[in-house]
Image (spheres, helix red, strand yellow):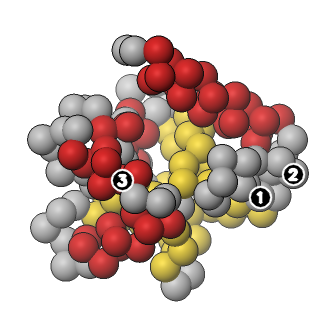
């Protein structure tokens, strides 16, 4: 991992710590785009795992991207929600139970949802997709 990636990774960990530590008072738009906290259950450990993720609203649901910064492997949380789609979501100070639905590139809504969340994140997801040969999956979080 190069210096730029280490700095970005450190900032993202800091962002999540602030979001969690302030119980959502700070963090929703700290990185210039809206982000949420999604907590899933580790498929191997059974432990709660939280990730701060940029999202786009789609009706009453929220779409996040399993980009892992364009790495060749998806983030661990994607495996968790595939094994157990029950999640907890926090947007700002609002918390709710949700259900995660994986949207792979063959899904009829994939292109529309990709465009929606990519625009929300200023085109970064297209950049991430160009770094990897895997097709990056999306996840729709719907309040339970």
Q: Is residue 77 above or below residue 100?
A: above
Observer-side mark, 2 or 3, equals 3
- Given contact means CB atoms under 8 Å apart, are the residues at marks 2 and 1 in contact? yes
Numbered label attached to residue 126: none
Residue 24 drawn at (x, y percent): 81, 50
Residues 57 and 9: in front is: 9
Q: Is residue 75 above or below residue 5?
A: below
The residue at which mark 3 appears reads as 125
Observer-side mark, 1 or 3, equals 3
The mark that comes first in sequence, 2 or 3, is: 2
- Given contact means CB atoms under 8 Å apart, are the residues at marks 1 and 3 in contact? no
Residue 126 figure quarter: bottom left
The residue at which mark 1 appears reads as 92
The residue at which mark 2 appears reads as 25
In the structure shown, which secondary structural element does the residue marked by tag 2 occupy? loop
Residues 30 and 17: in front is: 30
Q: Is residue 134 left or right of residue 101?
A: left
Q: Residues within 10 Å of mark 3 (few under 14, many from 20)?
A: many
């Amino acid at each position: 991992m190069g210096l730029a990636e280490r700095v970005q990774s450190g900032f993202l960990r800091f962002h999540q710590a602030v979001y969690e530590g302030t119980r959502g008072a700070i963090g929703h738009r700290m990185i210039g785009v809206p982000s949420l906290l999604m907590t899933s259950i580790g498929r191997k450990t059974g432990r709660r795992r939280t990730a701060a993720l940029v999202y786009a609203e789609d009706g009453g649901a929220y779409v996040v991207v399993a980009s892992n910064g364009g790495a060749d492997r998806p983030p661990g949380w994607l495996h968790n929600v595939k094994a157990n789609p029950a999640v907890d979501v926090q947007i700002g100070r609002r918390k709710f139970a949700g259900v995660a639905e994986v949207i792979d590139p063959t899904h009829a809504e994939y292109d529309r949802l990709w465009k929606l969340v990519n625009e929300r994140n200023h085109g970064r997801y297209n950049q991430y997709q160009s770094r990897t040969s895997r097709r990056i999956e999306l996840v729709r979080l719907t309040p339970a």
